[in-house]
Amino acid sequence: MRHAGQATLDQLEDVLTALRRLDGLKENSRGVFYRGGRAFLHFHEDPDGLFADVRFAADFERSRVSTAAERSAFLRKVRAGLDKPQARG
């Protein structure tokens, strides 16, 4: 699974815009977000769809973000995760 290219990130612009509005996240490069100086979120493209890797705990957790419903669920999950203390490890 490869990191999302610019064309894929164009498809995810609505998600990127929503993420940019969240306190505590910094977009170091397009589609790559950091939280407190640590990698927090990035995107992948695959023949099976579009995916986001998010660090809610010590390791990244993969979420599918191919459909509007998946994107909405993903953003709800990220917002809830930002309300919790940051994992270390």
Image: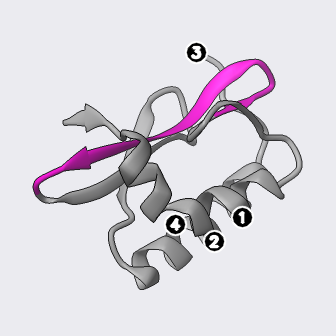
Quadrant of the frame with the C terminus: top right
Circle 4 sits on which residue? 74
By secondary structure, the bulk of the magenta-drawn segment is best described as strand
Give the Cα distance between marks 3 and 1.
Answer: 27 Å
Residue placed most toward the observer, 48 or 57: 48
Circle 1 sits on which residue? 18
Give the residue type that dot 2 points to. Arg
Give the Cα distance between marks 2 and 1.
Answer: 11 Å
| Residue at position x 37%, y 39% in the image | 5
Numbered tag placed on residue 89 in the rendering: 3
Q: Residue furthest bottom?
A: 69
Few, some or many residues within 10 Å of mark 4 (<14, 14–19, 20+): some
Few, some or many residues within 10 Å of mark 1 (<14, 14–19, 20+): few
Against 22, residue 15 (above or below) is below
Q: Are marks 4 and 2 in contact (CB under 8 Å)?
A: yes
Give the residue type that dot 1 points to. Ala
Residue 25 shown left or right of residue 10 in the figure: right
Span of residues in magenta: 33-47
How are the colours assigned in the image? one colour
Numbered tag placed on residue 76 in the rendering: 2
- Frontmost of labels 3 and 4 is 4
